[in-house]
Image: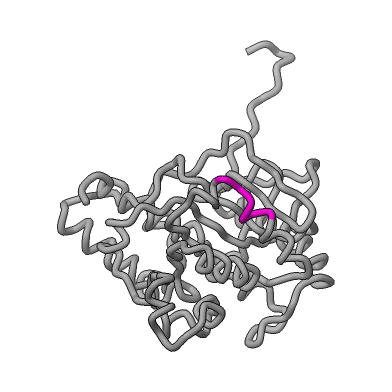
Amino acid sequence: MSPSAPAPSPQKQPSDIATHKSDIRAQIWRQLRAVAYPDSRFDFDFSSFIADFAGSDGATRRLTALPAYRDANIVFIAPDNCLEQLRRDALRDGKTVLVTTYGIRRGFWLLEPAAIAASEWSVEHAAMLDGMERVGRAVALSSVARLRVDLLVTGTGAINARGVRFGKGHGYFDLEWALLYSVGAVDAATPAVALVHDCQVVPDDVTLVPDEFDTVVDFVVTPSLLVEVEGPQKPVVGILWERLREGMMEGIPPLRELRALMDEQGCEKSVELRGRR
C-alpha cells in the first residue's frame, strides 16, 4: 500500500451500529412529533409503534400509482399506523393482503377481498389493526410458503435516498422479510416500498450504516416525493438466530415454526429451506 493511501475504515460492530441507529432515530423523532398522530395506546412513544402522520394519504396515492403496486396480486403490508389507508385501498383494488399482528405475536394473517365481501364486516374494518383478525384468517408459515408475495410495504423510523431504513428499534420488518425469504415467498428481486413523512428522509450528508440483516427498499414514498432506489441490495442471510432479541423466540410463533421446519428438513440455516416447498 502506498504511504499516502488512506487506511481502510474499520467495519462497524453490531454494538456500534445499534448506537448509530439510536442516535439517528432520536433526531428524526424530534421532527416527527410535529406531524405525527398519537397512537391510542402508545401516545407519542415512537419506540413502540410506527406513527401515522399528516399527509399520509398523499403518500399512499403516490404508492398506489407505482407499476409495482398495480401489477401485484398479493401484497405484504406491515401493521403500521401509517399504512391503514393502503390496506383499505389494496383490498378495494381486489388485492390479497398479507399482514402480521403487532410484534408478530400472533403470526401472519391473510385478508382476502372475497371473504370480506361475504362477511358482516367492511373493508374499512378489515384494514384496521383492531379489526383484521375478525375478518382475516391466520396462516401458518408452511402455508405462507405456498404464496408468492409480489410487493412488500412498510413504514419506518428513518430512511435515506439509498433505501437504507431504520425502524423503531425492534427489527420486526427485517424479521418479516427474513421469514418470507427463508420459505421462498419472496426473493431478492421482490420490490419493497417504505411510506414515510418527508421529515423522516435524512439529508444526504447523514450516513445510515445498515446491519447485515437490514432490509433495503426499492422505493421511498412521502407526501411530496417518490424516490426510486438505484440497485438496492436486500438481505439474503435469512434469520440470524444469534442476533434475535431476548424473548423473540418465545413470543413470535413463526420463528418457532421456522425452527421446526429446519429441524424437520435437517437445515442448519433458514435459507436452506428455499426450494424445498
40 vs 63: above or below: below
Image side of residue 117 versus residue 141, left or right: right
Question: Residue 155, how many percent across, how many down?
Answer: 62, 62
Inspect the magenta stretch and tell me whether residue 4 lies in it: no
- Is residue 16 visible in this depiction of the protein? no
Main secondary structure along the magenta-highlighted residues: helix
Q: In front: 62, or 161? A: 62
Q: Residue at x 55, y 58 (%)?
A: 153
138 vs 182: above or below: below
Question: Residue 93, how many percent across, how many down?
Answer: 52, 63
167 vs 88: above or below: above
Q: Residue at x 43, y 88 (%)?
A: 120
Screen quadrant of the N terminus: top right
Question: Residue 24, how many percent across, how many down?
Answer: 73, 57
Inspect the magenta stretch and tell me whether residue 64 lies in it: yes
In the picture, residue 7 is in which quadrant? Answer: top right
102 vs 181: above or below: below
Image side of residue 30 versus residue 259, left or right: right
- Is residue 147 visible in this depiction of the protein? yes
Please tell me how many numbered marks the rendered image carries: 0
In the picture, residue 33 is in which quadrant? Answer: bottom right
Question: Residue 135, how many percent across, how many down?
Answer: 42, 81
Q: Residue at x 82, y 65 (%)?
A: 31
Q: In front: 230, or 125? A: 125
Q: Residue at x 70, y 17 (%)?
A: 5
Residue interval drawn in magenta:
62-67
Image side of residue 44 versus residue 80, left or right: right
